[in-house]
Amino acid sequence: MDILAAGRSDGSLILTPMEDCLPRFQLQHPTSVTCLCWRPYCVVRTSCSPYKSGLSVQTEELVVGDEAGSLYYYVVEWPKSEEISQDGWLGSMCLVAKISLHSHQVCGLAWSPDGQVLASGGNDNLCFLMDAAVILGGSRIAETSPGFGPLGSTRLTTDSWTSRRSGMETQPDMSRVRHHGPGCEMQAWAHRAAVKAIAFCPWREGLVATGGGSNDKCIHFFHVSSGSALATIAVAAQVTSLIWSMTRREIAATFGYAQPEHCFRVAVFGWPECNQIAAIPWLGDLRALYAIPLPRNDDVDEEDTLGQSDGCIVVASSDETLKFHELWPLGQTATMGRSGMLGGSDILDDLDGIIKDGDVIR
C-alpha cells in the first residue's frame, strides 16, 4: 500500500495516498510528532468497513513517537481506489496501544526485518526493544479500539478527542486501548547521549546497531534476544543514521557534530571486524542530519530481499539539500577515503552464529 505519513511540530499527523497526494486522515496529537515508522509487513484483520462486515483484509501498522516520549500504535485500513469508487468508504485508523517508556522526546524508531521487534530511541539516552506480540496482546482491533474516520481532524488527548467530521466531542473508552509502561520492554540499553540511529541487520537475525549522540559518539552493536553488547566503534561524532548493506557485511553511518572536529560525514564499517572500510569528507561545516537507502531498480523477486542489490543512500544535509552517495556500486569498489581514519573496536561476544561468513552475501 502506497501511503505517505507525515508528522509535524504542531502535533498534526496526516496520512495521504501517493497517487493523488490528497490527505485522507488527519489527527492532532497533544505534542509535537517527532518520528514515524511503518511496520514492514501487512497484518490480516477483520475489516472495519460497513460494507465488508466479518471479512478479513490486509491492514498497515504505524508507530508514532512524540516530544513527550510516548509511542502511539495505529492500525490503518486503506481500501484501494476502485473500492472507494464503489462504496465511498475511505478507510479507518484505529489507536490500539500507547507505550510510555521514554521520559523525553522519541527521536528514533526501527522495526526488525521480520516485523516482530520494535526499537525506539530517545533523548533520555535509552534504546528500548519491544515485542510486537506483547504490544498488541492479540486484541481484536476492529472491535476494541477507538477508530477515526476519514479526514477526522481528530484531537488526541488523554481526556477526549474532537472530531470535526461529527462536530461533537466525545469521551473515548481509553480502557480499550492497551497501555504499556516500564516492564513491557524486552531489552533496554543505556547510552551516553540521545539515540536517533537504529538499524536491524537484514541478513543476520538478532543483530542490531544503534548510534549515540554528541556525548556518546559511538556505534553500538547488540544481540537482540540476550541483550548482550557485541561491539562498539568510536567515531568521534554524533551518529545520525545507520544503514546496513544488503549485499555486503558492512554498515554505513552518517555523522552530525564531530568532536574532535573532522570532515567526514559518511563512513562505512565492516562486520564483525568493526574496521573502517571507507569515509567520505564533506566541505565546510555541513552536518548529515539523516539518511535513508534508495534501492536500485533491479528486476528481482520482491520477496527475495537478499537478492536485491544496494542502491545509493540519500542524506539530508544541514544546508537544506539532499546528497546522494553510492557506497556499494555494482561490480566495483566505491571510491572514497582511505580506511582507518575513525578507528574501530573488537567484538565483545559471539552469539547465535553472528560471525563473518565472507565479504559478499550470496
Image: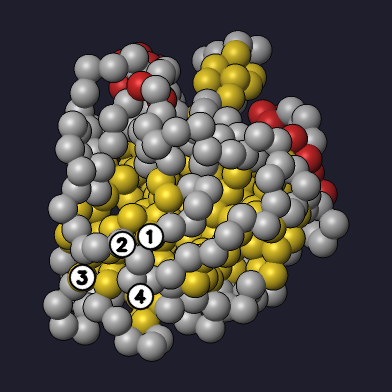
Q: Which of the two residues, 323 or 320, is positioned nearer the viewer here? A: 323
Amino acid beneath label 3:
Pro
**Distance between the Cα atoms at labels 4 and 3?**
12 Å
Identify the residue position indicated by label 3 in the image: 281
Q: Are marks 4 and 3 in contact (CB under 8 Å)?
A: no
Evaluate if marks 1 and 3 touch, with contact meaning CB atoms under 8 Å apart: no
Residue situated furthest right in the rendering: 183
* Residue highlighted by disc 4: 256
Q: Which circle's residue, 4 or 3, is located before the other in the chain?
A: 4
Q: Position of residue 350 (x, y in %)?
A: 68, 45
Disc 2 element: loop
Q: Secondary structure at mark 4?
A: strand
Q: Quick check: marks 2 and 1 in contact, CB under 8 Å?
A: yes
Residue ID for mark 2: 339
- Left or right of 119? Residue 203 is left
The residue wearing badge 1 is 276
> Is residue 221 shown above or below 281?
above
Q: Residues within 10 Å of mark 2 (few under 14, many from 20)?
A: some
- The amino acid pointed to by label 2 is Ser
Separation of marks 4 and 2 at Cα, in angstroms = 20 Å
| Residue at mark 1 to residue at mark 3: CA–CA distance | 14 Å
Give residue 256's position: percent from left, percent from top.
Answer: 35, 75
Count of labels in the image: 4
**Where, quadrant-wise, is the C terminus in this rendering?**
top left
Q: Earlier in the sequence, mark 1 or mark 3?
A: 1
Callout 4 amino acid: Gly
